[in-house]
Amino acid sequence: METDIDFELLGIAEVIKRDAFIVPSNQREYAWLKNVQVKDLLQDINNAIRNNKETYFLGTVVLTKNDKGSLEIADGQQRLATTTMILAAIRDYFLSKGDTDMYRSIENDFLFTYDRKEKETVSKLTLNLDDNDYFKNTILSNKTQRTVQSQVRRSHKLLHDAYQTIVEYFENIEKQLGEANTKDQLNNWLDFLLINARIVKLVVKDAESAFIMFETLNDRGLKTSQADLVKNHLFGKSDVRLPEAQKLWSSMKGAIETVANDDDDITMEFLRLACCVITGATREKDVMKKVQDISQSKNECIRTLTLFEELSKDFAAIINPDHQKWNGYDLSVRKSIQTINLLGVTQIRPLMLAIARYFNANNTALAFKKLVAWSVRFMIMNIKGGRLDEGYARLAFAIFKQEIKNETDLKRQSEKLVVTDAEFSASFENTKVSVAKLARYYLRSLENTARQEPNPEFLPNEDTVINLEHIMPQSLKNGWDGLTEQDVETHFSRIGNMVLLQANTNSIISDSNFEIKKKAYGLSSFTLTNQLAGLDKWDTQSIDERQKLLAKLAVQTWPI
């Protein structure tokens, strides 16, 4: 999508001086901590001034224009608000010293402006609905005009603490330098904020454009700002149903937060997955456009938020195998989720989400077992990227549209996506596995198939410590004279060169030759390990032959 973009590199105080800014009413509150971000900013500026640095870069501030032409802050609220408080504290210092000229200059340049149309003085920075009155009445207003206001929100306390930290910082400068030198120093601060403490001021035409721009920006608060843009659109369009919208969003966030304490990334990931289910394949940068398309009226907004709220509970469930949703389901559902978590596959989540939401308990259990098998097959064949993203989203969307209603429908419509037995077997014959936990999982599952145990593809209950043993070692010594370094390079990480052993046995024989090792293998209770005891030698041909046998077991272990 093409966007109209205006950008300038300016001092942050110069940006504040030129324009007035609004934090959208439903965007997040002030969040900087006094002993972390606020103190860091003060110390950074002070050090930069002391060391005569020409530039201190504060990142990118992203702005959009609302219907009235006013600038709204899409990203950068914390920096702009904290800088405004620094300017207010400098103003208050000069006022306390009787320097009314400096006081008026700072107040008129940086803190307030006169609105000719409304015929009133308004603040340069307007915070969100929850914070603005407190910010304006207790910080922006000068000391003679301030009113006492209760701190009814956590953000109010953070604003108060931030401002007091700034005031105390300047008081400490005065203790060190004296009044006259402090005035000169604070003038230096003003000049530095006007010229040297720079930001990229980026103005885009609308919230969707701002959302897309975040894909290329690596700035503080990135993911949260993206989610805020989605929320602001939905709240803004919900009109008289705003309380209902707020309740649904809050419930959605509550469900998401059960699977991640830091929900910046996870919120956007959920919104992307939900859009995949509701609208089809969705990249993260397309989330805003997709949400706008399906929520153009207040009723559509509530419908969209209702779907998000419903899906958020299932999202938490597909990540957490212990989730209460699975209480009435077959135990295999929890086992499937545990296994998928171990494999570390996330591309499959849109399909898992749709199945969890719209299939009954029996079909969910059957379908999740299929997803375990698909995941292993794709990993062995190193298939990833667009094919899986589009394929999983296509199936998820078909479930949402009720074109796929059960596991049988899913199997039929997935034929073009899933690899065949022949393809899987051929790839397994040559696969290398460098991640120990994956190799151990593959071998345990194959072992269960060899023993004809049910559900071999699930994680077993580990009651002993099982180690992964490489038969041909990485360092060729102690009787491995027939092999070369080239053999190690090509075959050491082949799964055919690996067996399972109890930990104490593995530590004893790890550097031994094959004659010694096979005696230990003969004592193993693992079928696939025990089989090696009858071999006379171990070389690359032995590895190839064994891996072909394992490939046949793999087709049975992870069936489609």
Image: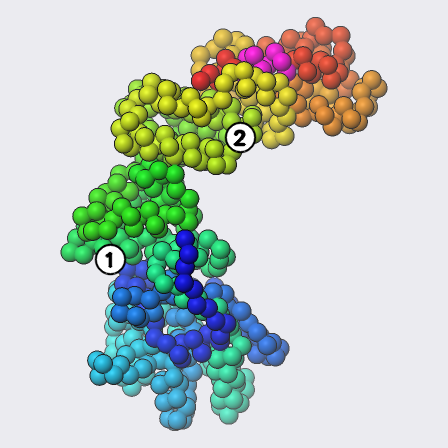
Q: Amino acid at mark 1?
A: Gly
Asked whether disc 2 touches disc 1, contact meaning CB atoms under 8 Å apart, the reply is no
Residue in the picture at 55% in, 72% down: 56
Residue 378 lies left or right of residue 28; in this view the side is right
Mark 2–mark 1 Cα distance, whole angstroms, equals: 41 Å
Q: Amino acid at mark 2?
A: Ile
Marks counted in the figure total 2
Secondary structure of residue under mark 1: helix
Which residue is nearer to you in this view: 411 or 431? 411
Q: Tell me residue 111's x, y (percent).
A: 35, 80
Image quarter hosting the C terminus: top left
Residue 212 lies left or right of residue 115; in this view the side is right
Kindly indicate the quadrant of the structure image that contains residue 317.
top left
Q: Tell me residue 530's x, y (percent).
A: 64, 10
User: Mark number for residue 383?
Assistant: 2
Residue in the picture at 30% in, 38% down: 278
Residue 472 lies left or right of residue 178; in this view the side is right
Residue in the picture at 62% in, 18% down: 429
Q: Is residue 54 magenta?
A: no
Secondary structure of residue under mark 2: loop
Magenta segment range? Answer: 547-554
Q: Tell me residue 244's x, y (percent).
A: 19, 50
Q: Is residue 549 magenta?
A: yes
For marks 2 and 1, the one nearer the N-term is 1
Which residue is nearer to you in this view: 355 or 509? 355
Q: Is residue 320 visible?
A: no
Which residue is nearer to you in this view: 142 or 293? 293
Q: Which residue is mark 1?
A: 236
Q: Tell me residue 277's x, y (percent).
A: 33, 36
Residue in the picture at 35% in, 51% down: 288
